[in-house]
Amino acid sequence: MIFFDIDETLMDNNSAQINAAKKFFKEFDELSLLYSDTDFPNIWNEVTGNFIQLFVQNKISFQEQRRFRLKEIFQKEIEDQKADEIFKVYLKSYEDSWLLFDDVIPCLDNFSNKELGIISNGDSSQQRQKLRSLNIFDRFDSITISSDIGIHKPDKELFYHACEQTGIKPINCFYIGDNYEADMIGAKNAGITGIWINRNNKKIEDNEIIQIQSLNELKIIINPN
C-alpha cells in the first residue's frame, strides 16, 4: 500500500496560498496601510501556519482558525459573521489556484496497479474537495483525513487507523510526505516506510530517511508492477 500526503506532496499548496493572498491584498485597501504588497503573502502564510497548527493540536476548530487569522491580519476585532464573509473572498481565490505538481499524474499512472491511499492533516471536507477538484479522488482506494477521527500527524495512531482501514500491516506500507516531522517521524513511529519528498532540498541530518526531490523517483524505490 502506498499512502500519500496532499499539501506540498500532491498539490502545490504554498503557491495557491501566495496567489490567493496577493488577490486578497488588492481587495481590501486598509491592508495597504498595514503591510507592503511584497511582504503580505509571506505574512499571510506565517499567520496561516500558526493557526493551522492550533487546529491540528485540537485547540481551535477549523472555522475558528479562519476567523483568528483574519483578526490578526487586520489587527482588529471582527464579528464572526463578518469574518466568515471576508474569508470567502480569500477562499474563492485559493480554490481557483489549486494545482497539482507536474510529477503527480505520471507518478499515479506508474502505480495504477498498486493500492493507493491518502493520509492527510486538515479538514475532511476541504481535503476531499481538493482531490475531487484536481480530478484524482478516484485514484485512491483509501482516504484518511485527520479531522475524521480527531487525531493528527505525527501521532502514529492516525497512521495505524489508515492501515486498519485497508487491512494491510504498516510494515507493508509506504508513506510519501513533504513534512519531515509530521510525515516522516509519524510514519516511522507507526512502522511504515517513510519517503520524504524534499522538493526544496532542505537539509536534515537523518541518514535513515529515504529522500526524493520528485515523485518521478518513486519508481526507482518502489516496484510499480
Image: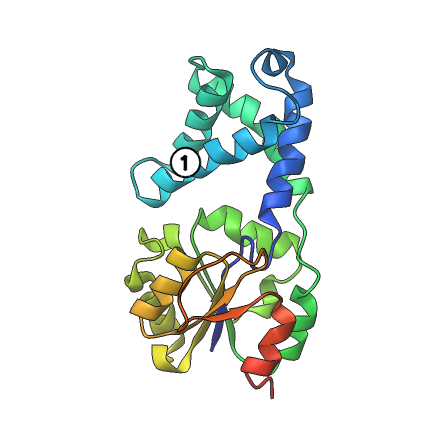
Q: Is residue 138 left or right of residue 202?
A: right
The structure residue drawn at horizontal position 49% and vertical position 23%, both measured from the top left corner, is 70
Which quadrant of the view contains residue 30?
top right
Which quadrant of the view contains residue 209?
bottom left
Residue 207's x, y, as percent? Answer: 41, 71
Please tell me whether residue 124 is drawn above or below residue 42 in the rendered image. below
The structure residue drawn at horizontal position 57% and vertical position 86%, both measured from the top left corner, is 223
The structure residue drawn at horizontal position 50% and vertical position 25%, both measured from the top left corner, is 84
Display colour scheme: rainbow
Residue 122's x, y, as percent? Answer: 44, 48
Q: Quadrant of the C terminus?
A: bottom right
Residue placed most toward the observer, 80 or 97? 97
Residue 140's x, y, as percent? Answer: 55, 69
Residue placed most toward the observer, 162 or 24? 24
Residue 93 visible, this angle: no
Residue 1 visible, this angle: yes
Which residue type carries mark 1? Asn
Please tell me whether residue 221 is drawn above or below residue 9 in the rendered image. below
* Numbered disc total: 1
Please tell me whether residue 74 is drawn above or below residue 219 in the rendered image. above
Which quadrant of the view contains residue 62?
top left
Q: Is residue 146 left or right of residue 88?
A: left
Residue picked out by circle 1: 50
Residue 214's x, y, as percent? Answer: 62, 66
Q: How many neighbours does mark 1 have within 10 angstroms: few (below 14), some (14-19), or many (20 or more)?
A: few
Q: Secondary structure at mark 1?
A: helix
The structure residue drawn at horizontal position 60% and vertical position 27%, both measured from the top left corner, is 39
